[in-house]
Amino acid sequence: MVTGGAGFIGSALVRRLVADGETQTLNFDALTYAGNTHSLPDPRTTQRYRFIKGDIRDHASLSSAISAFKPDIIMNLAAETHVDRSITGPQAFIDTNIAGTATLLEAARTYWEALDDTRRQSFRLHQISTDEVFGSLGPTGRFSETTPYAPNSPYSASKASADHLVRAWHHTYGLPVLISNCTNNYGPYQYPEKFIPRVIVNALAGVDIPVYGTGENVRDWLFVDDHVDALLAVAGRGEPGETYAIGASEEHTNIDIANRICALLDEMRPRGSGSYADLITHVTDRPGHDARYAIDATRARRELGWQPRKTFETGLRRTVSWYLDNRHWWAPLLDREV
Ligand code: NAD
């Protein structure tokens, strides 16, 4: 059972699960502005996939979905995820990311406690979290599983709170949970409010490409399908009660990424005159903008045998090419009222 499976990462996970064909997958998603059924298989075309429009804050509908579907594992990707939105409207982040996770934990616990011994032992609840819970790094060092939490934005604070709840449900009730904290993802089907698709769609529209401040903020970037590999490794082979830091050690500044995307577009879809990079515009920085995130994924690599398959160069090329070929997916989102 995947919650939030109509979003960017959740839909990549659902597509993989359905394509691999060995599992039954239930996608439970509220279809907020960020959820999109066009990113997903059609449930009418396969027996292996079901969709329920439901809200993780709604205990009754969650419980009835769980007791009808009887999952072996619940992977929670349902969340409000855009930092800028968390600054202008934090309440939705508190409601879904904190209260929603608590509601899910309680629904899962009730279900898990009633399972027979064998299924109780193999059940897992996997909370998908972010490296942003660790705060901001200086020029050196990397986050790992032992880094103390120090979230700085309403988004990261809500995700940190959720992680604490998940941990507490393990220690207090014995619920077999897993937590993974991943770096920034990029790839196909990402909502165009996020940085990489924003650069691509603005460039193609010939409008300003906004870059916060000087553009020197550093993020560690992971191709979304590599994150899906990591999620399946954590869910399948992770130790209950443990957390796993996931990242590709691909650190890049925002301004470097904007320039690389413009160079790829210059090559793949040349403008009439000049470079797309001429559209890059520095705008007032986000309040409290974290300087640098980077993950040390040694544990996931060593204990789970996970490793990313795409370099940033190949992943970015694939992403730009996908947005060029799939305007029908993203163009309607630009006009959507949210
Ligand atoms: P997204 O915003 O693209 O999708 C979120 C999904 O959750 C949407 O389908 C939305 O409809 C659904 N949703 C929101 N509120 C809900 C609710 N109350 N009940 C049920 N469904 C609800 O997010 P994403 O980028 O795919 O991120 C998924 C998870 O991964 C999040 O928990 C996020 O914190 C985490 N994460 C994301 C990144 C990243 O770079 N995108 C990196 C690390 C971790």
Image: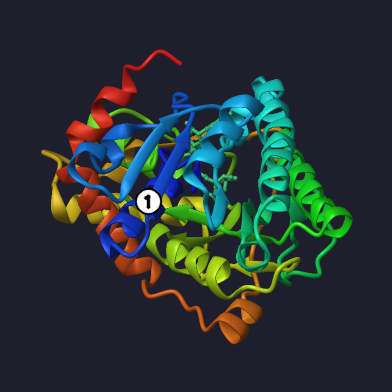
The residue indicated by pointer 1 is: 14
Please determine whether, in this image, residue 8 is positioned above or below residue 294.
Answer: above
171 and 113: which is toward the camera: 113
Horizontal and vertical percent position of residue 187: 36, 53
Location of residue 206 (image quadrant)? top left
Residue type, mark 1 in image? Val
Which residue is outermost to the right?
Answer: 172
- Residue found at x 26% / y 59%: 19
Give the crowd class for mark 1: few <14, some 14-19, many >=20 residues within 10 Å. many
Q: Is residue 229 rendered to the left or right of residue 147?
A: left
Is residue 135 in sight in this rendering?
A: no
Horizontal and vertical percent position of residue 5: 44, 42
Horizontal and vertical percent position of residue 299: 66, 80
Horizontal and vertical percent position of residue 326: 19, 41
- Residue found at x 85% / y 61%: 148
Location of residue 294 (image quadrant)? bottom right
